[in-house]
Amino acid sequence: MNLHVALFSSILAIGSGAHPLEPARGKRHFIANLRRQTPAVKLQNGTEPVFDAGLVRMEVQGLLNKYSMASDFLNGINLNPDTHPDTGYAPFNDTPIVQYWANNSKPSSLLTRPRPALSVRGAPAAGAEPILGLPDEPYASFELMPLTDDVADGMDVAYYGALKFGTPAQALTVSVDTGSADLWVPVACPGCSHEQFDAAASSTYRNSGRRVSVTYGAGRVAGTVASDTVALGALSVDAQKFVAVRTESQDFMDYASSGLLGLAFRSISRMNAPTFFEGLLAGHKLAAGIFSTHLTRGSADGSQICFGCFDLTKTTGPVEWLNLTSKTYWTVTMDGLGAGRNRTAPLNLIAAVDTGSSLILVADDVAKQFYGLIPGSQDASATYGSGFYTYPCSSTVTASLIFSNRPYSIHKDDMNLGKLSDESEDCVGGIIGVSSEHGLPANLAIIGDVFLKSWYTTFDYAGSRLGLAPSINNH
Ligand SMILES: *[C@@H]1O[C@H](CO)[C@@H](O)[C@H](O)[C@H]1NC(C)=O
Ligand SMILES: *[C@@H]1O[C@H](CO)[C@@H](O)[C@H](O)[C@H]1NC(C)=O
Ligand SMILES: *[C@@H]1O[C@H](CO)[C@@H](O)[C@H](O)[C@H]1NC(C)=O
Ligand SMILES: *[C@@H]1O[C@H](CO)[C@@H](O)[C@H](O)[C@H]1NC(C)=O
């Protein structure tokens, strides 16, 4: 309990504006301590975790910092120009999908599922799984990036995978973040605790000396703009720009990965450089101008990003497409939230789809309206600060986000951040309200992993669309 108190006071001291490079303790450190000191408290009764307020409040504070420029960006202010790296790519065509095979074995369940115009490449023999769906192009090029889910206290804190940097290649882990647009890894960073890039060992490394700093949901980093060859499997980008980080806030030192891979649009890059994905696009390295994310729930293995592809084996139904409303963050219009058959009043929200956020954040009045639709829900601001709500753990009401007038459900396990206490029958909801005084646009909704675990998500850069297909997580 003392730890909670200490953590809260450090968050309050940080405030919403300036996020120092030396905030108190990071969340993994915090978790480690909590586990060490009170090992029995966390999962005492069955599998339902107790709400970890410190972890969640830290993430909310981080997201407020990360989106502190969102108001400008969404109003078209301070954007870098669009250099159209997707020139030459058509929107991803998901109807004639070709199945690629891991080996020459037989298809399983997928082919028995009704799917229009499905064709099969090659002659599958007995026993194999189809692995990838792609538009029917003869020399299609794509790459799967396996991700590790960093699970802590029942929360999927971050997803990260490996990229190769330099010549000869050095593999480093990066968290995948569709809510920012810069790539960074530590280089000669005295205080960094993770594996670093050894720039001196790479013959292709260059450093411009230009200083840059970037704020994320998990903290802040500062360094200089560098470039080198960056590769994922057989795909590579020469002279990919990234931040050679010299200092990172404590929050990142407690993070599971070395660096971070921004997958939003160059328009909001702090370096004003193409992202790694935009580099692949511009080099015409991909079969399709898309990447797709599969994020697991509570399991270290199995998550992935499909670069240039769509993995049929991660979905249980067709894709629905939503047009992007800007190419800054991945933004789409959100019409409101739903609870069972009930809905909030129609709201014209801008939803930023952010794999780097675990939570869903909306304006406080939107959260209030939403929880008002769930019988038995309560404002928990007296206990946890404004924006937190509880609902009966036994509730069978399904929460959803409404896009194009259609509800997209959120799996109940993701909606539930944990019970108030071991004895409590109330659970804290994963949709959190943000007071307008924090400076986030009142019509902004940050849509993180609480939602994305239920939906296999295709980020169609060339087609300016976002695709949502039901995830295999939900069976
Ligand atoms: C766990 O919780 C359930 C209901 O909330 C209760 O019936 C059960 O006795 C609890 N078990 C333990 C070991 O505390
Ligand atoms: C082919 O696929 C089957 C089923 O997925 C698997 O058991 C087998 O190991 C694979 N063979 C090779 C050579 O990858
Ligand atoms: C989405 O964009 C496409 C192409 O610009 C357009 O044809 C379609 O009508 C749009 N859909 C909606 C729902 O606005
Ligand atoms: C939700 O919808 C049901 C009918 O489906 C209705 O009876 C109930 O009053 C609604 N609840 C709220 C809070 O709107």
Image: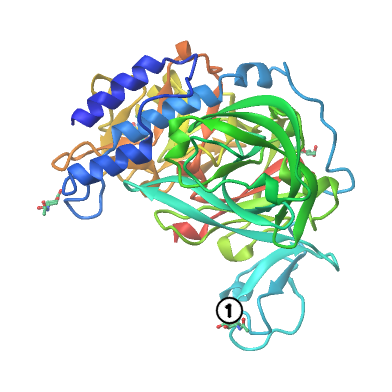
- Which residue is at 56% across, 24% downward? 67
Q: Is residue 422 left or right of residue 299?
A: left
Q: Position of residue 362 (x, y in %)?
A: 47, 26
- Which residue is at 34% across, 42% downward? 416
Instruction: Give the labeled residue for mark 1.
Output: 108
Position of the N terminus, as image quadrant, is top left
Task: Work out which residue is located at the far front of the displayed protein and give it.
Answer: 200
- Is 449 in front, or is 347? 449
Q: Position of residue 95 (x, y in %)?
A: 75, 60
Task: Work out which residue is located at the far right of the displayed protein and give it.
Answer: 88
Image mark count: 1
- Is 78 in front, or is 372? 78
- The answer to whether residue 366 is visible is yes
Q: Is residue 79 left or right of residue 376?
A: right
Q: Position of residue 408 (x, y in %)?
A: 52, 44
Q: Quadrant of residue 435?
A: top left
Position of the C terminus, as image quadrant, is bottom left
**Disc 1, SS:** loop
Placement of 93 over or under 21, stated as above or below: below
Q: Residues within 10 Å of mark 1 (few under 14, many from 20)?
A: few
Task: Give, as a three-letter code, the residue at label 1.
Answer: Ser
- Is 33 in front, or is 269? 33
- Which residue is at 25% across, 32% downward? 376
